[in-house]
């Protein structure tokens, strides 16, 4: 191999390593742990392992349900450890996004972001959830049936000339010895 290629190869290798380091810095500056996902919330503990940055807050969860698009959801932050190595618990409310699942299982994806990195501060986490209950099967009974009271007409009894109406029988006291 010609020695004039060595400097060019060395520069290309340095450039590649430099690009890898630059790409890894934002992910390394914030570490997420304790990821949790339910039908109502998504949460993780996010540690700022780099220099404190005023643009680290507010933290926002971005959530995608099934084939839908990512949507920012209301997120609550609780500082667990203040200072240079700040640790924050970030909890996002996703109940409005999962309310319509009606017992179907789907994949939910989520990542946390903040103003200095709005397109993906953490890795995208994923979990399958089954939320709600399936709709009740349609009833086979007729709905809203109104029943009217039965009305029966009977013929009045007719009196035949041969039929004698009963009469009271008068009987006096009788002594038997």
Image (tube, rainbow, N blue to C red):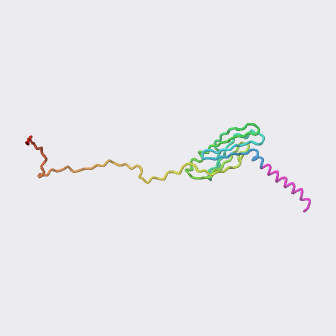
**Residue sitting at 28 percent across and 49 percent down?**
151
111 displayed left or right of 165: right
Q: Nearer the viewer, residue 91 or 100?
A: 91
Q: Tell me which segment is drawn in magenta.
A: 1-23
Is 43 magenta? The answer is no
* Magenta span main SS: helix
Q: Is residue 102 left or right of residue 177?
A: right
Could you tell me which residue is drawn at 64 percent across and 45 percent down?
42
Question: Residue 17, percent across and down?
Answer: 82, 52
Q: Residue furthest top?
A: 82
**Residue extending furthest toward the right:** 3
Figure disc tally: 0
Question: Would you say residue 7 sits in the magenta stretch?
Answer: yes
Where does the C terminus fall, quadrant-wise?
Answer: top left
Quarter of the view holding residue 176: top left
Q: Position of residue 7 (x, y in %)?
A: 89, 56
Q: Give the x, y percent position of residue 135.
A: 51, 51
Q: Nearer the viewer, residue 146 or 129?
A: 129
In the visual, does 7 lie left or right of 147?
Answer: right
Q: Where is residue 29, by image quadrant?
A: top right
Q: Is residue 24 left or right of residue 99?
A: right
User: Residue most toward the front?
Assistant: 177
Q: Residue at left 42%, top 50%?
A: 143
What residue is drawn where x is 55% and y is 51%? 103
Quadrant where the N terminus sits is bottom right
């Amino acid at each position: 191999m010609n020695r004039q290629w060595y400097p060019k190869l060395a520069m290309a290798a340095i450039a590649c390593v430099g690009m890898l380091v630059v790409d890894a810095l934002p992910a390394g500056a914030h570490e997420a742990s304790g990821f949790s996902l339910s039908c109502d919330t998504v949460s993780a503990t996010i540690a700022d392992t780099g220099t404190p940055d005023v643009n680290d807050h507010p933290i926002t969860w971005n959530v995608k349900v099934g084939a839908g698009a990512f949507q920012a959801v209301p997120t609550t932050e609780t500082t667990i450890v203040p200072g240079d190595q700040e640790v924050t618990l970030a909890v996002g409310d996703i109940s409005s996004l999962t309310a319509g699942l009606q017992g179907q299982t789907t994949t939910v994806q989520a990542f946390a972001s903040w103003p200095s990195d709005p397109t993906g501060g953490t890795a995208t986490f994923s979990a399958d959830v089954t939320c709600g209950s399936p709709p009740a099967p349609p009833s086979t009974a007729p709905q809203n049936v109104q029943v009217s009271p039965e009305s029966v007409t009977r013929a009045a009894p007719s009196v035949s000339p041969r039929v004698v109406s009963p009469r009271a029988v008068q009987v006096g006291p009788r002594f038997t010895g």
